Image (cartoon, rainbow, N blue to C red):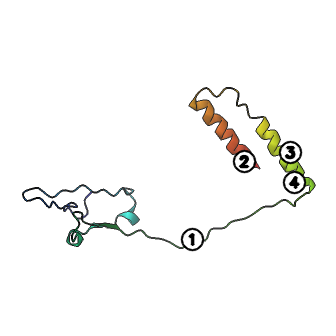
Amino acid sequence: MLTNPCPTRYSDTAGEANLVIDLMFLYYRLRELNRHSIHPNSHLSSDHAPLSIIIPIDEEIVYTSKSSIPQKSKQETTFVEEVISNFKNLDMSNIANMEKLEHIVNQLEVIIDQA
């Protein structure tokens, strides 16, 4: 959908047509990103008109947490042993194709998430 249908590339060769060749990839149905413009009067010495978009940035509070295990504690020893055991139990002997590789990577992700 063209917001302001006008050229974005201006030819410096006499008789050659101006073109619309620049692209902005925006989410089609997202109303917040539907405020984009081509600025044909701002190309100055460049052969391209600037393209701009207004992107709304909302303030957002991101809650985070951090877990820790005391060093040299029984919990740390148990945790490390469990992670090592889970890594050792990964069957990586027959990774013959992408599907099997993806399966192993997904298993590794589960181990890391559970850790």
Q: CA distance from mark 4 to mark 2?
A: 15 Å
Q: Is residue 66 above or below residue 89?
A: below
| Label 4 CA crowd tier, 10 Å (few <14, some 14–19, many 20+) | some
Q: Is residue 41 above or below residue 9?
A: below
Q: Are the residues tagged 4 and 3 within 8 Å (C-beta)?
A: no
For image coordinates 82% across by 39% down, the residue present is 85
Q: Quadrant of residue 54?
A: bottom left
Q: CA distance from mark 4 to mark 3?
A: 9 Å
Query: Tag 2 or tag 4, which sits nearer the N-term?
Result: 4
Q: Earlier in the sequence, mark 2 or mark 1?
A: 1
How far apart are the two marked residues, 1 and 3, measured between alpha carbons? 39 Å
Q: Residue at x 58, y 31 (%)?
A: 99
Residue assigned mark 2: 112
Left or right for 99, reference 111: left
User: How far is disc 2 from disc 3 in space, using C-alphas?
Assistant: 14 Å
Q: Secondary structure at mark 4?
A: helix
Residue at image position (12%, 56%) is: 17
Q: Is residue 50 above or below residue 26?
A: below
Residue wearing tag 4: 76
Give the percent coordinates (x, y) of residue 109: 68, 44
Q: Quadrant of residue 2?
A: bottom left
Which mark, residue 60? 1
Label 3's element? helix
